[in-house]
Amino acid sequence: MPSIKSNYRVLIVGAGSAGISVAARLAKKLPADSVAIVEPASKHYYQPLWTLVGGGVGTREETAREQRDLIPTGVAWIHDAAATLDPDANRVVLASGGAVAYDFLVVCPGIQLDWHKVAGLAGNVGKHGICSNYSYESVAHTWPTIQATKSGAALFTHPSTPIKCGGAPQKIMYLAESTFQKRGLRRDVDVEFICGMGSSFAVPRYQQALDGVMERRNIASTYLHDLVEIRPEQQVAVFAHVHDLSQRFERRYSMIHVTPPMSAPDFVKSSPLANEGGWCDVDKGTMQSPKYPNVFALGDASSLPTSKTGAAIRWQAPACAENVLAVMNGNQPTAIYDGYTSCPLVTDYGKLILAEFDYDKNLKETFPFDQSKERWSMYMLKKHVLPKFYWHGMLKGRA
């Protein structure tokens, strides 16, 4: 791996799926030592499989790789965290106190899990019937929590904030409900989906399909309410209406799967690159900053108005890399990302609805059949094919 320098032609903040994919593509076009990635984590995770891990299929260890093994050849890894983005000086200040200068900056540090925004939640995941698939640490508690639930209420939450993989809060719910059913416990366990959004899914075709699954399996749903507090010792969850926080209700639970509120990392929020919502502001087609032409952003921390999924990054990364190279060569960015995203919606063990759509909620389905139908083949795609595609294709800049 190249030695660390004080400045780079391209500096990438974040070595998740977006950062590695863009780096791999740029490294093939630029001289060695031109690109560096700032990333504090030593491990890299294939997070889409955490749904199955939480449902008792596979282990979390199978989703992890050493970060050093994924950094593309010729790309420097600055094993540190970004503390300040300073686009006016074309530099990134590191948590260790140093700074790295750049000619071009690509911002893709992922999303921040704001556990602290739910009173009583931080420090209690894995205890008192509380679980969450949303981190490598917490996903280990989900399956034991489902197994320990014999009666009472099983709650599954979805906040009103943008989140990574918008379908994930429902996926684990369907697997848990199926588990209760197979164990003869369903009559004793009430399953409820409590969501801060206005419906189960943003695209009508898939919304109708998911609503049908919930109705058929007697899963209750409540919308436009956020989880705002948990009283762990009492196993009580408090929800507030998203438009009027004074409107609240409580639910006792035996288990609760929590999807925490999420936001852009704090160093992005506090930077000149952030929009009013705190996301790194870029053109939704070219991924170029409107204020700083040498800055691009993609992935979960960006302002791109699409679902925050790995499949979205699969289409963002090549366009972003192409546009960085175009501007570097004195041209205007021409590659346009149309908002394509995909959400493989697991609805049971061996069943999956493959949602694919663009910015305008137009369907962008890959296969010549109705993907809103639950299918075993699509479940096999998620479980066996997509992980290999990720590790050996996407992260290598090959697909």
Image (tube, rainbow, N blue to C red):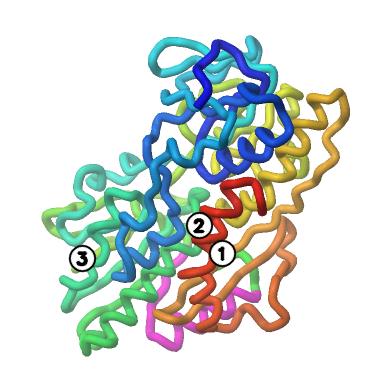
- In the rendered view, tell whether residue 209 sits above or below residue 229: below
Q: Which residues lie in the magenta part?
A: 205-223
Residue linked to disc 2: 165
- Say which mark, if any, is on residue 145: 3
Q: Is residue 329 magenta?
A: no
Answer whether residue 239 is visible to the viewer in this image.
no
Residue linked to disc 1: 343
Q: Which one is earlier in the sequence, the residue at label 1 or at label 2?
A: 2
Q: CA distance from mark 3 to mark 2?
A: 22 Å
Q: Are marks 1 and 2 in contact (CB under 8 Å)?
A: yes
**Residue 108 falls in image quadrant:** top right
Q: Position of residue 241 (x, y in %)?
A: 42, 56
Q: Position of residue 190 (x, y in %)?
A: 27, 78
Report whether 150 appears left or right of 339: left
In-front residue for pair 69/349 = 69
Say which element carries label 1.
strand
Name the residue rendered at 26%, 85% in the picture.
Answer: 186
